[in-house]
Amino acid sequence: MTTDDTTLLDPRWGKPDPTHDPWLLAHFRPRATDILITTAPKAGTTWMQNILHQLRTGGDPSFDSIDRVVPWLELPRAGLDHRAVLDGYEAIESPRIFKTHCTYEQTPGTDTVRLILSSRDPRDCMVSFYHHVMDMTDAARAQGQFADLKSFDDVFERWMSFGAWFRNIHSWWPHYHDDNVLWLRYEDMKQDIDPCVDRILQFLGWQITATQRDAVNKYISFEWMKAHTDKFTVSHRGEPLFKPGGFIRKGQVGDHKQQLSKTQEQQILDRANELLADDCLDFLGLAS
């Protein structure tokens, strides 16, 4: 984490925490060719990182870490201050691709870059987040301030109180029709990824050959990603933060039906209905 005084920053950039360095956001220099993947946590972020990397390269199985080729924009880097991290970003050739979990207000370059959103049913996001926490190593849970979470109910309460999904969707929905925004639903991607890839290519103005498309389809498949979990597992100072095979789990639609109680499900739906517009709820498949 940078030691710079965050009181000097515009509050829009947020407060520092183990996964959020506001100095990186405030001093990032966006390019017109940049692509930012913006999602709430556990809404298909890693999948979208891989999809865009594969489309950019025409199919590349050789990368060692998805974070190296598609960095997490606001993530503090061990042993580096924000200046060194930003220097690294400047050295990346265009088109650069980054992921972020920021709200619209916190995202730099919203009037400059191209933005691809992936949203997912909040009930499935919550269940996926529970397994995400449980699959962490003990050291990672302590570092992420999750050591006190022992049960599903504990994680549910933390997820609800933190409210990242609700903040993210609420902030981005007014920009659904912006020319530089493409919003895809995780559920549609799971049902049929091909038309979603077509929309991404059209949105970015990219073209790939039929042979490259075959390679892309192979490397973005759940089976390939599950077999190569090490490429997608987050690490810290060279140490994996997740147990072997734990980062890529199932990615199913409707998994919440097996774990959420009726009361918990209703709490999520009630919060969504309080915060989101009717057309947003309808788009997300949450309208009652």
Image (cartoon, rainbow, N blue to C red):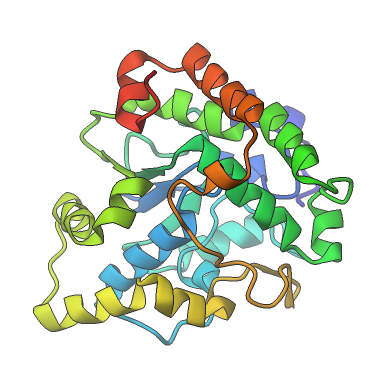
Q: Give percent across and percent down for residue 136.
A: 75, 63
For residue 78, what is the image quadrant?
bottom right
In the image, farthest residue toward the bottom? 62
Residue 212 in sight from this viewpoint: yes
| Residue in the picture at 55% in, 34% down | 165
103 relative to 245 in the view: left or right: left
Work out whether residue 196 or residue 85 is closer to the camera in this orientation and state it: 196
Q: Give percent across and percent down for residue 129.
A: 63, 48
| Residue in the picture at 80% in, 61% down | 140
For residue 231, what is the image quadrant?
bottom right
Indicate whether 45 appears above or below 233: above
154 relative to 212 in the view: left or right: right
Residue 174 in sight from this viewpoint: no
Q: Give percent across and percent down for residue 197.
A: 22, 59
| Residue in the picture at 77% in, 43% down | 4
Work out whether residue 118 or residue 91 is closer to the camera in this orientation and state it: 118
Q: How many marks?
A: 0
Q: Give percent across and percent down for residue 93.
A: 37, 69
114 relative to 230 in the view: left or right: left
Indicate whether 139 appears above or below 262: below
Quadrant location, the C terminus? top left
For residue 59, what is the image quadrant?
bottom left
Work out whether residue 281 or residue 77 is closer to the camera in this orientation and state it: 281
